Image (spheres, rainbow, N blue to C red):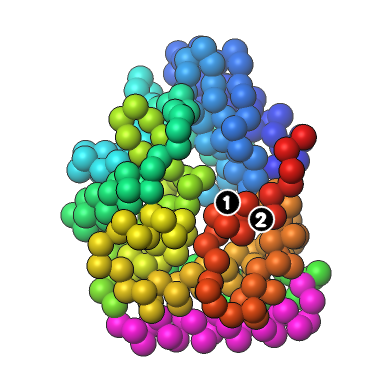
Amino acid sequence: MDTTDVTRAIEAATAVAASLGLPADGATVLQNSNKLALRLTPCDVFARVAPVGQEVARFEVDLARRLTAAGCPTCPLAPGAEPRAYPRDGFVVTLWTYYEPMAPRTSPADYAEALERLHVGMRTIDVPSPRFTDRITEAQDVVADPYRSPELPDTDRVFLAGRLADLRRAIDDHGAPEQLLHGEPHPGNVLSTRDGPLFVDLETCCRGPVEFDLAHVPEAVCAHYPNVDRELLDACRQLVLAMVAAWRWERGDQFPDGRRFGEELPRLLRAGPPWPTLDTVTARLAPPPA
């Protein structure tokens, strides 16, 4: 979000908290991209704010309630607030339990064990959800429409369109079992807490093979996850790189330093295996600390 929208989003979140009797005189921005993540104080609530029409907050809240009840390692909704999405001044606000960051970060073994427990719990949840191929379609639509991706070079447009179509076909033809998934269980969506690793940001949940989720996590985590189909994992890693590349070229994308990702990911896909994980690409492209 730009500065004006950030200010309005903070005002919306604090107003929602105040309407529920939660004192929120201060707000710290934890993450800012297409959505805003805030720590509200002194009530110590984690708020996520998205523009109306750019979120699936009601789905996320309902799913979070079901997963928490099933004992899954997910961040629970904020106590003391009705578990729902709150529209306010052009935004939708959801309120969650805030956890102080713990050091050191979650170990790969604990990360893998938590993700496996999440997958086991998700198999017990019957909720309408999109298939992972809907995410591919979104990326293909961005690549196919020059209006939506006006600065995408023609050579990369043709390349990404072909790679997305080929990978979609290859993964479908693999015929792996599918289930409810987190959708983006990368390290940025895992909290290290005293209660162990907890997954956040459930808006991206979809149905697909578990290797689609594993394609978002570090290699060391995959090494601890049981019964991984390595061929399918390689295909899903390529798919994730291709989709992320497409989204970084979309008009209005606000991912930090997104253009560098849009340029680098097609290059990595052309370079061939071994396919890098998202965390290694992020570490390579992250700007040096100030």
Q: Which residue is mark 1?
A: 54
Q: Which residues are magenta?
A: 152-175
* Above or below 217: residue 18: above
Residue 249 left/right relative to 275: right
Nearest the camera: 213 or 283? 283
Q: Is residue 63 visible?
A: no
Q: CA distance from mark 2 to mark 1?
A: 29 Å
Label 2 vs label 1, nearer the camera: 2
User: In terms of secondary structure, what is the magenta stretch mainly?
Assistant: helix
Q: Position of residue 172 (x, y in %)?
A: 38, 82
Q: Quadrant of the N terminus?
A: top right
Q: Residue at x 81, y 69 (%)?
A: 151
Kindly identify the amino acid type of the residue bearing the numbered disc 2.
Answer: Arg
Give the secondary structure at mark 2: helix
Q: Which residue is mark 2?
A: 284
Residue 235 left/right relative to 251: left
Q: Residue at x 61, y 76 (%)?
A: 269
Kindly identify the amino acid type of the residue bearing the numbered disc 1.
Answer: Gln
Nearest the camera: 55 or 248? 248
Q: Quadrant of the C terminus?
A: top right
Say which quarter of the image contains residue 281. bottom right
Q: Position of residue 170 (x, y in %)?
A: 43, 85
Nearest the camera: 288 or 77? 288
Q: Is residue 247 visible?
A: yes
